[in-house]
Amino acid sequence: MLVLVINSGSSSLKYQVRDVAAGTVLTEGLIEKIGMGNGGGGDGEPVGPRDHAEALEQVDAAIHEELGDQELGAVGHRVVHGGERFAEPVLIDNEITRAIERLNPLAPLHNPANVLGIRAITRKWPKMPQVAVFDTAFHRTLPEHAWRYAVPDELYTNHGIRRYGFHGTSNEYVARRSAALLDLPVEEFDGVIAHLGNGASVTAIRGGRSVDTSMGFTPLEGLVMGTRSGDLDPSILVFLGRAGWTPEDIDTMLNRESGLKGLAGNNDMRSVVEASESGNDKATMALAVASYRLAKYIGGYHVAVGGAKALVFTAGIGENSQQFRAQVADRLGALGIELDAGLNAGRSKEPRVISTPQSAIPVLVVPTDEERAIAEATAAVVSSIR
Ligand code: AMP
């Protein structure tokens, strides 16, 4: 089955067409500046599509050119927030679209854009099966003691304030591939997965299911990220509010100006590593803060899963930064974790082991592929209803 995978943002639309059986990508692309016009200046700025429907026309033209008369079998949407309702991918109908829309307050930047993408497809191809694959769904197995914040119950009951977790699609895929590499059924996989991209989270997996994860009510909680702070004392926000910062000021500071960028002046891990290696003290400090934070979580999650059978690194930094992996592993000596320097320095698109045979547990690098996971989930849902 050919599946069009759509990742719809407020002003962008990323797409990929995949042949699910063959595991191949037939074509892919990114449409940007949706709804941005030409900035009103007429100064040569490229004009983006007017709206998501017009962006979809561009996608249609581009994929038609590549695919000729091969037909799409389904569309799979990456949907950021599935709230408490969605524990797995679902076939989209009007009621599901409205349910995703009702979750807008929980993901105000993402869910409305996802709904725009769904509605654009519904209008253009009314008969096309569409599946929503939720970033939160994999974490619906968190036990209550892990998802509760210790605040008055009404915050949960009236506002849905609890921990949801994100990066679920990636985690589910990486857990499966890690179990396969270890020759275990996924139901017997207990491990810790560090998904380290521009957004970063770490997840505790017990019996193939998520039992804790570092992102919470929003993707801000947890690790030090490219531009996000991760954990901090909530009183800091009260302090800043009293000092006259608006909610928007605080939001921008925590989500866009913090993390590696706040500490080292650069949100890109490769640049921070390079700066540190050429003697930049702030970059060295930023790497220490980020690796220390992650190591603390790994230690905690090793306990949460009852003894991990593996530590797994994935996503941009996890897959590519041997320096950051080494710094994290250096802090995990108490767990008996030991990297093999040669294997850690190697590169491959395939899942691999980077620890020594003496390491108490294997350390893996498992490339993630969210689009592939979404395409497979979409094909599975559509096949099950045919
Ligand atoms: P992602 O969001 O998964 O695309 O990951 C983006 C992050 O991966 C950025 O911080 C990049 O600097 C980092 N990254 C990508 N390639 C490398 C590399 N070769 N070495 C270090 N970091 C990398």
Image: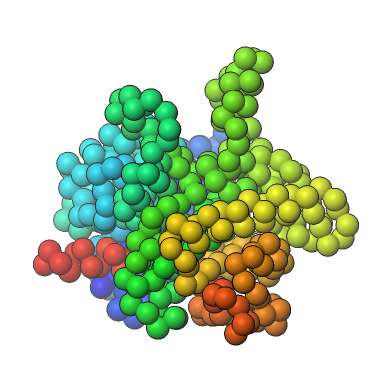
Picture quarter with ligand 1: bottom right
Residue 374, quarter of the rendered image: bottom left
The residue positioned 17% from the left and 47% from the top of the image is 93
The residue positioned 35% from the left and 66% from the top of the image is 208
List the single residue furthest toward the right.
Answer: 279
Which percent across, then down, holds residue 164? 39, 44
Pick the front one: 46 or 144: 144
Q: Is residue 125 visible in the rendered structure shown here? A: no
The residue positioned 88% from the left and 57% from the top of the image is 279
211 vs 278, left or right, is left
Pick the front one: 78 or 43: 78
The residue positioned 60% from the left and 18% from the top of the image is 241
Q: Is residue 115 above or below residue 279?
A: above
Which percent across, then down, holds residue 267? 68, 49
Q: Is residue 146 above or below residue 206?
A: above
Q: What kind of colouring is applied to the model shown? A: rainbow
Figure quadrant of the C terminus: bottom left
Figure quadrant of the N terminus: bottom left
Which percent across, then down, holds residue 252? 60, 32
Q: Is residue 379 visible in the rendered structure shown here? A: yes
Q: Is residue 105 above or below residue 135?
A: above
Which percent across, then down, holds residue 143? 33, 49
Residue 82, quarter of the rendered image: top left
